[in-house]
Image: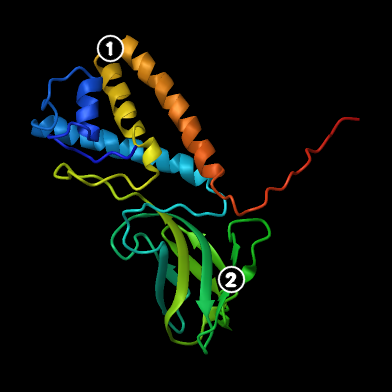
Amino acid sequence: MSKVFSNTTTKDGLIQNIERNCGFNDGDISGNAVRLAQFTGDINSSMDWVYTKIFEVGGTWQFDDANHVDYPIITTTIMPGQRDYSFSTDGTGNRILEIFRVSVADVNGNFYDIQPVDVSGSNAPSSFTDGLNVTGLPNTYDKLGNGIFLDPIPNYLRAAGLRVYINRESSYFVTTDTTKKAGFAGLFHEYLCVRPSYYYCLRNKMFDLADRYKLMMIEMETAIENYYKSREKDVAKTLIGATNNSR
């Protein structure tokens, strides 16, 4: 079942579960500012690990934290003569983890996808680096650092004419949270109790408990991967035969 961050009344929040897992007394974390900050950090790190697993197996149903208030699509203005556009955070300050699709609008406002290229590769098009700076309707882009580079360079102005589809970091907990829940499937919120408990026990040489929680972590990580890679019930699965290189 899904879990809130902290509930000192019903005792079923993430913090209260960790208190029990690690042998603390009731309130030893929720009522201690230093411990609460430490375990909040461990919970957020555990959430990052969950998202890593989800992004690896997500398929065509792109995952996004349910706590985000907008879709993982950034729009910005296409500027005449401007090749590069920087994207380090989304519109509400969440750090971007990945750019996986780019669309641009033409002068009439019609959007079309443009193709990714790698200017560092052996087959890289020279138009990005030859200094000729050809202008027109972009048809390719290169990702470099925190931005993308368009080619040809746009020769027109179009408000909200550039769309970038992204994966982004989670909506993290802060120590003052109470009823907030993690933005992935509630079936697996228990992982956010188990992983911090494992690291606490490991740091404090409680090795029997640490081993137990490590096994639980591995089982939960497998369950998370299986859930997220199989949730596309409306997508037909295709079998691809393995290549046999034997002679």
Q: Quadrant of the N terminus?
A: top left
- Residue 143 falls left or right of residue 18: right
Any mark on residue 206, and which? 1
Badge number at residue 23: none
Above or below, 194 relative to 154: above
| Residue kind at label 1, given as amino acid type | Met
**Farthest-out residue, bottom:** 108
Residue at the image point whose x is 45% and y is 25% from the top: 218
Image quadrant for the C terminus? top right
- Which residue is labeled 2 in the image? 114
How far across and down, in percent of the image, does residue 210 sit?
33, 16
Dots 2 and 1: beta carbons under 8 Å? no
The residue sitting at 56% across, 43% down in the picture is 230
Q: Which structural element holds mark 1?
A: loop
Is residue 144 depicted above or below 79 in this figure? Answer: above
Per the image, label 2 sits on a secondary structure element best described as: loop
Query: Is 217 displayed left or right of 174 in the figure?
Result: right
